[in-house]
Image: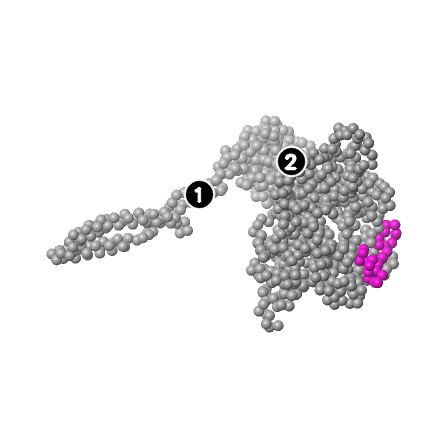
Amino acid sequence: MSTTENNIISDTSDWSSELIQRYDAEISRIAADYGLDTYPNQIEIINSEQMMDAYSSVGMPLGYHHWSFGKQFLETEQRYRRGQMGLAYEIVINSNPCISYLMEENSMPMQALVIAHACYGHNSFFKNNYLFQTWTNADAIIDYLLFAKKYVSDCEQQHGIEEVEAVLDSCHALMNYGVDRYKHPPGLSAQEESGRQKEREEYLQTQVNHLWSTIPVKENADDIPEEIRFPTEPEENLLYFIEKNAPLMESWKRELVRIVRKVAQYFYPQRQTQVMNEGWATFWHYTILNTLYDEGFVTDGFMIEFLQSHTNVIAQPAFDSPYYSGINPYTLGFNMFKDLRRICEKPTDEDKEWFPDIAGSDWRKTLDFAMRNFKDESFIRQFLSPQLIRELRLFSVLDDDEQDKLEISAIHDDHGYRHIRAALAKQYDLSMREPNIQIYNVDLRGDRSLTLRHILHARRPLNRDTNEVIRHLSRLWGFPVHIETINEDGTENMTESI
Amino acid sequence: MTQIIDRRINGKHKSAVNRQRFLRRFRQQIKKAVSDAIDSRSITEVDHGEKINIPSKDTHEPVFGHGPGGRRDAVHPGNKEFVSGDRIARPPNSGGGGGSEASDQGEGEDEFAFQLSREEFLEFFFEDLELPDLVKTQLTKVTNFKSVRAGYSTTGVPSNIDIVRSLTGALARRIALRAPYSIELKEAQTELSTLQNKDEHITRIKELEEEIRRLEDKIATIPFVDTFDLRYRNRIQKPTPSTQAVMFCLMDVSGSMDELRKEMAKRFFILLYLFLTKTYENIQVVFIRHHTTAKEVNEEDFFYSRETGGTVVSSALELMLKIIKERFPSDDWNIYAAQASDGDNWDGDSPNCRTLLNDSIMPLLQYFAYIEIMPHNHQSLWRHYEGVKVQNRNFDMQSIDSVNEIYPVFRQLFARKPA
């Protein structure tokens, strides 16, 4: 098409700020045409060492200081130097404006890929997915992290690095158990936080007194039936419980617990939407850059470089390959969104039978709906099609320690589709992946010991870290901690105590 | 609207603090690794960073998770030959094999490895060490110059021209040079105006007009700026004082020092040398090796050239004294000495050494460290040196039996002494 050749933005692999701006303008226009709704973008150009920094602070643009981030940095650095891994092309922060990091080493096609992927793909996912809308507050996160960083370093000055480190260690051990799953959290704002913090400290201190008050409040205290437990309902947010109820905890420690809890909550949606989030972003960089090519803005060479990277990203080694390390979330997510578009545009009879509602519908609306209202588990359960199961040749293996052999429970055939779909969905269900552990009781009248209950699922035992984690919990709680394992039939199995 | 920010100019080492935190937390393990590394390293490699391994159980961060066992149904891609109902043997390291299983983490690698930079390595190595009692801090030796401003000069390079100053001078010069002509000019003009157009004065008017033109020309030819006016900002090199020290390394290379002993002595000096170059920026090191006669050599020869013979320790001490007198007046220098030997000495020489040390050398020295390497049993030199130790607080001696004792002894010799 000779008429469009003038559109070409650049034909070398060198990038410059102006070029990035021009590519961004075109990509932004195309994204808007496709109806992507995004936060404003802030693109930051960094070098590889800064990228390693960003890595090791687990994607927080401002992290408080802790040795574990140093460990992560050393690990990344070591592996990068040895050439065992390349650095990710981008890191994107769920904030408003949405911050994306671009590495200076990348060529222009790579930068364009990253812009489409992060600044429009991830960005629109952050803004619109229900989990992110419910659990994170993109406007406030930077302020909150700043507050947290300052608070932690103030504590270090006042109470010493060791003390603070010990509390953070314990909190990190319980981080995955520091999230609310069902309530809406109040918005975080640095001003509110620091304003209310004093109030909270004082209030909390008065609240916990009843746990260890030795004076009987009521004369008829004996009438209280023995079975009453505290908390009355089991509590699954361990850090929340500690923050509110640990009897002897100093208020600054409570605040640290709260900070870790808030950070955990902020990352909670990301842990549940890995496949969707990456799939969505990959689908859109693929779609947008192809549109860019169709409109004549980029050269063949650009596309070849882009496609090569894209192919690497979505490579899925088979289960028997030495490179196999589980299902690649990029592959699964990208293929699912692509497949969804196919089902909308060119449905087969099979699709019409399996997806009567969406076969033949407007693909943009359907994808948008899927992006907004699902997480990995429900997304797979809802949209994984037989055709994709066949393409990826998925099969499921039943590993039962009571059997001496593994059993192939389903393959990509008529009998297997539903089983595979359900099994794969379960694999992404956090509540299946993590042991179900809740706070069951506090011995209010005795030694104030805390009892956890682990409810066994599929007979899967706890890992070897358990004792150590319990020790951390006990450090925060200040009194002994027991853990009971409850069988699926409700019988108590065993108890361990620290 | 997209905002593009170039962050590359910002600091790189955002994680530096976290890295420090990590090193701090695993101080004990790293120290041990560093100490092991020193023992097993060959000398030429001492001055490098080091790959440190820490047992990963120490750095492991525990979390609740599922252990192996129970019943799990895992989905994998790339089926080739299986059909449902197939039963296959459990592969070794079973556990479902799924990469997404949390329980797979933390197993396999039992060492956490990372690179310690040279600075960090030495920092760990030299921790708590300090040359003893650096009392004399003679701030005399001129090594560094600082450029400071010192008024103006009439010569210099164009970039140093001070424009205001130069033009002020030019203005003054112009006023001064113009002054006599201006006065005459004024007089001529006044006279001319009194003679207004009267015919009888026509010749005088012509004269005056001529005069005025001449004076005006004179004034006009006074240059606006002359090279004479130029003033340059003047800078002079001002010496900044720094502490200085000299370290004498004395080593016995006689026949009785076998390879292993030499190796150990070399290590001691290597450590010393590293320590000095690290701790003091301005330090000189003098290497003296001796058998029956002593010789000042360069570092390379000191550690690596081979020569053997009998043993006369005092020869080295005498040479050291000579060098001190010639090159390092003790008013200006902090002098340290370290001697390594196997304790062998010609019997008649040991009393000489004692006298030499007590009378001449020790008063000049800040500190003298003697190490005896693998002595069969202490001989006369050791006994005489013990006598020196009694008389001089700044004399210290230790004996070493094996390579891994060097480090503790080294630390003991140079340990921070309570004030």
Report how many numbered discs are placed on residues in the image: 2
| Whole-percent x, y for residue A169 in the image | 70, 41
As rendered, which of B291 and B362 lies closer to the eye? B362
| Whole-percent x, y for residue A331 in the image | 73, 59
The residue pinned by badge 2 equals: A159
SS state under label 1: strand
Q: Establish if A216 lies above or below B40.
A: above
Q: Write the start and end of the magenta stretch as one range.
A: A398-423
Q: Quadrant of the N terminus of chain B?
A: bottom right
Between the residue at mark 1 and the residue at mark 2, the CA separation in whole angstroms equals: 46 Å
Q: What crowding class fits label 2: few (fewer than 14 Cα within 10 Å), some (14-19), or many (20 or more)?
A: few
Question: Which mark, residue B148?
Answer: 1
Q: What crowding class fits label 1: few (fewer than 14 Cα within 10 Å), some (14-19), or many (20 or more)?
A: few
The answer to whether any part of residue B267 appears in the image is no
SS state under label 2: helix
Q: Which amino acid does the dot numbered 1 rest on?
A: Val
